[in-house]
Amino acid sequence: MKLNAQQLRDLEEKRVHGELREIKRNPIYFILENIYDTYNIGGLFRLADALAIEKIYLCGECEIPPNSRIKKASIGTYKVVPWEYRKSAGDAIADLKSKIKDQRSKSQIKNQNNSNNVTMEQFNNVKIIAVEQHPSAVSYTSGVYRAPLALIFGNESYGIAAGTLKLVDQIVEIPMFGINRSLNVIVSAAIVSYHVIKQIKHP
């Protein structure tokens, strides 16, 4: 099923909680830290839907749906993409790791009861990757990606907080060849996440 912008805006909540919740999702999470611009948040919801990611975590100083500007920029995709608010990116990381660990344990039990064909790689903890211009960052094309993973995107002016960067497994950046230090957060997220999904699906 594919819906145009108007159909998404008019989409009824009860329908979202029914058939559209059955979308097969990719094991990617967005963690948005202190994204101030509500239009950026809405655009990231639209991107998240395009990628069919598992969930968005809105963290810190972020507006949340049903903010009118988020609704407008997301063209209704905020109703389709699972999301939740956390006080900090650190809280989101802890919550995500806990949930992945619980899913892994349930999968191991199911595997023991049924088959031994599942590899241990499927039970690895979630990998946390920050997208940030940083001295220790590597180009996003050189990053090491495996599912499940979370991509952190930071504030439009000062990026991802130093404390949050200490919690990640890897920092990747998009090379910048002009005098501008960074791209708009939606553009950055699109470039990196489409590369990531290709690597996960075709390692």
Image (cartoon, grey):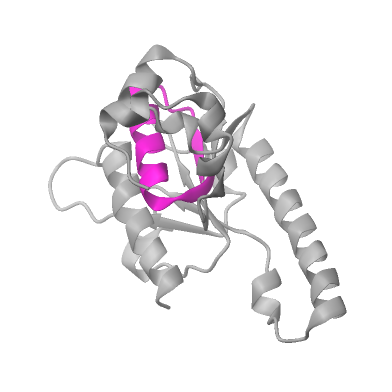
The magenta-colored residue range is 30-55
Q: Residue at x 62, y 49 (%)?
A: 167
Residue in the foreground of this view, choosing between 115 and 13: 13
Q: Residue at x 59, y 49 (%)?
A: 166
Q: Is 104 within the magenta?
A: no
Which quadrant holds residue 119?
Answer: bottom right
List the single residue furthest toward the left: 178
Q: Residue at x 71, y 43 (%)?
A: 95
List the single residue furthest toward the top: 68
Residue 43: x and y, percent?
A: 33, 33
Report whether 107 appears left or right of 8: right
Q: Is 38 within the magenta?
A: yes
Residue in the foreground of this view, choosing between 177 and 7: 7
- The answer, for residue 18, to whether it is visible in the render is yes
Identify whether 28 is placed above or below 159: below
Report whether 133 appears left or right of 66: left
* Image quarter in which the C terminus is found: bottom left
Residue in the foreground of this view, choosing between 125 and 90: 125
Residue 175: x and y, percent?
A: 24, 56
Residue 10: x and y, percent?
A: 37, 23
- The answer, for residue 173, to whether it is visible in the render is no
Report whether 69 appears left or right of 154: left
Report whether 7 appears left or right of 97: left
Identify whether 177 is placed above or below 69: below
